[in-house]
Image (cartoon, rainbow, N blue to C red):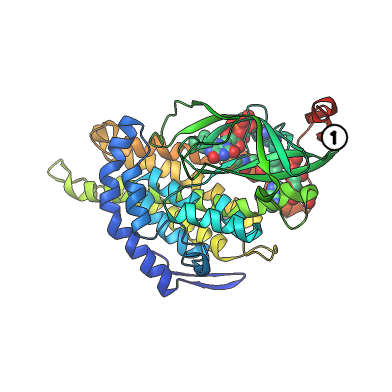
Amino acid sequence: MLDRIEDTGGAISISPRGQELRNRAAVLAPKLAACAASIDRDETYPWGCVATLTEAGLMGMTIPKALGGLGASFLDVVLVIEEIAKACTVCARIVVEANMGAISAIMAYGSPAQKRLAADLVLAGDKPAICITEPGAGSAATEMTTRALDRGDHYLISGEKHWITGGGVSRLYLIFARVYDQDGQHQGIGGFLVAADPANGKMPQGFTVAGREPTMGLRGMPEAHLVFDEVRVPERMVLRTPRGFGSGFADLMTAYNSQRVGAGTVALGVAQGAIDYARDWLLEREQFGRPIAEFQGLQWMLAETTTKLAAARALLRQAAATPGIDGFGFPDVTLAAQAKLFASETAIPAVNTALQMFGARGYSREYPIERMARDVRMFTIGGGTAEILKTTIAARELGIKLPQTRDGYVDQEAAVPMALAAE
Ligand code: FAD
Ligand code: COA
C-alpha cells in the first residue's frame, strides 16, 4: 500500500493521526463485517454499527476540536473509509456522510449556532443527508424545481427530492432549493438546514418521507423519496455560502467535492476487500492437485487488479490532500472528479474479477462477494455519474463551459413559474 506519493502539489504523507485513525478503523472492521450480511438481508439501517463508529470517534472526525471533533483532514478520513469499506459498504457510506459533504459544508459556511447544532448531532451518531436530486433533475441538478420562498423571517420550502441517502433515519438535512425573494424574483440556489425536533425526534410539519427505493445493493441504507410541503425554515437555518444565492450552487458543490472523494474511496475499499478475500481463496482452493494461486491466468488477474487499485488509491489520496482554490480546503473539483471516476470505474470490474476467482462460491449468498458486487455497482451513478464527471473534467481541461442543453442554456426562470413563486 502506498503511503507516500508525489504530485504537482508536493509529497503527500500520512500523519501519525491518520495512521492511528486507520488502525482504529481496521480494529473495528471484523465487527462491522459481521453485520454487513444481515443488514443487506434485512434491509435495516445498522444502528448497532453506528453506535460502534460513534464510540470509536469516527463520526465527525473533520469537525473542529473546539466543537468536540478531531479536526481531522480529508486525507485522514479517506484512510478510515477505505478500511471500513473493506468490511461493510453501508458503514463506510455513513462515515463519508458524517465527515464530508453536508457536514463539511456546514463547518465551512455555517453560523456558530448551525455548526454547534450539526456537530452535536453528528458526534452523537447522526449521518446528515444531502438533498439535491429530484425526479426531474438528476444529472441536470441545476434544473431543480424545489423552491424556497422568502417570507421575511423564514422561508417556505416546497418540492420533491428522491434517492436521498439516509432519508428517514438522518436527523439533519441539507436541502438544495431554488430561492425566490419576497417580490418573487429568482435569486439562485441556496442550502437550507432542516433538523428533527430534539425533544421528540420528529421532522417539521410538511416534511414527509414518502417512500424508499428497492435498491440492487447497499440495502442497509434507505434511499428515500422526500416531499416538502411548505416546510418552514427559519432565517437562522439558511446556510449562507460565501458568494450568496447567486453562486450558491457552485459554493455548495465546492463542499460536495469532498463527498465525491469519499464515495470514490468507498468504491476502492469494497474492491480491495473483495480482492483480499479472493487472494486468500487463491491460496486455499486446490484444483488439479495444486492451489489455484499457481495458475498464471489467475496471477495476472490479481496483478492487474491490484495495480489499478493502487493507482486509484494514489489518485484519491491526492484529491483528498490537494485543496482547491476555494480557501476552505475542499478537494479540487477536477481532481475530485478524476479520482471518483477512476476509482468507481476500476472498482466495479475489480469486484467482478474477485467474484470470478471464487468460482461458483462467488455467486453464492453464503459468501460476501456477491453483495460487494451489488454494492459497488452504484458508484458510477450516485454522486455524479461517470459521464457527468467526464464532462466536468473536460470543461476544466478545456477551460470553457460545456452546457449540455440543446441551446446551451438552462432557462432557470422557467424552472418554477413566477406565478408559483408569487403564491
Ligand atoms: P440521469 O441524469 O437521468 O442520467 C441517466 C443517464 O444519462 C446516465 O447514464 C447519465 O450519465 C446520462 N447522462 C445524463 N446527462 C448526460 C450528459 N449531459 N452527458 C452524458 N450523459 C448524460 N442524490 C442526492 O441528492 N442525495 C443523495 O443522498 C443521493 N444518494 C444516492 C444514492 C444512490 C444509491 C443512488 C443510486 C443515487 C443517489 N443520489 C442522491 C442521486 C444521484 O446523484 C443521481 O442518481 C445521479 O446524479 C444521476 O441522476 P439520475 O439518476 O437522474 O440519472
Ligand atoms: N465544484 C465546484 N463548482 C461546481 C461544481 C463542482 N463540483 N459543479 C458545478 N460547479 C459550479 C460551476 O463552476 C458553475 O459555476 P459558475 O456559475 O460560477 O460558472 C455552477 O456550479 C453551475 O455549474 P454548470 O456546470 O454551469 O451547471 P450546469 O447547469 O451545466 O449543470 C451540473 C451541470 C453541475 C449539475 C452537473 O455537472 C453535475 O455535477 N451533475 C451531478 C449532480 C450531482 O453530483 N448530484 C449528486 C447528488 S448526491
**Other residues around mark 1 within 10 Å, as few (<14) / some (14–19) / many (≥20):** some
The answer to whether 51 appears left or right of 121 in the picture is left
Residue 373: % across, % down: 38, 37
Q: Residue at x 54, y 61 (%)?
A: 320
Quadrant for ligand 2 reads top right
How many discs appear? 1
Q: Residue at x 50, y 41 (%)?
A: 379
Q: Residue at x 71, y 35 (%)?
A: 156
The residue to which callout 1 is attached is 184
The answer to whether 405 appears left or right of 131 in the picture is right
Q: Quadrant for residue 106, please give it.
A: bottom right
Residue 257: % across, % down: 61, 53
| Secondary structure found at label 1 | loop
Task: Pick out the residue farthest to the front.
Answer: 199
Q: Is residue 187 visible?
A: yes
Q: Residue at x 41, y 74 (%)?
A: 16
Q: Nearer the viewer, residue 197 or 170?
A: 197
Q: Is residue 101 visible?
A: no
Task: Pick out the residue farthest to the left.
Answer: 289
Residue 187: % across, % down: 82, 43
Q: Quadrant for residue 160, please give it.
A: top right
Residue 25: % across, % down: 34, 59
Q: Quadrant of the N terminus?
A: bottom left
Q: Quadrant of the C terminus?
A: top right
Above or below: residue 127 compared with residue 77: above
Amino acid residing under circle 1: Gly
Above or below: residue 317 compared with residue 309: below
Query: For disc 1, does the CB lie below 8 Å from ligand 2?
Result: no
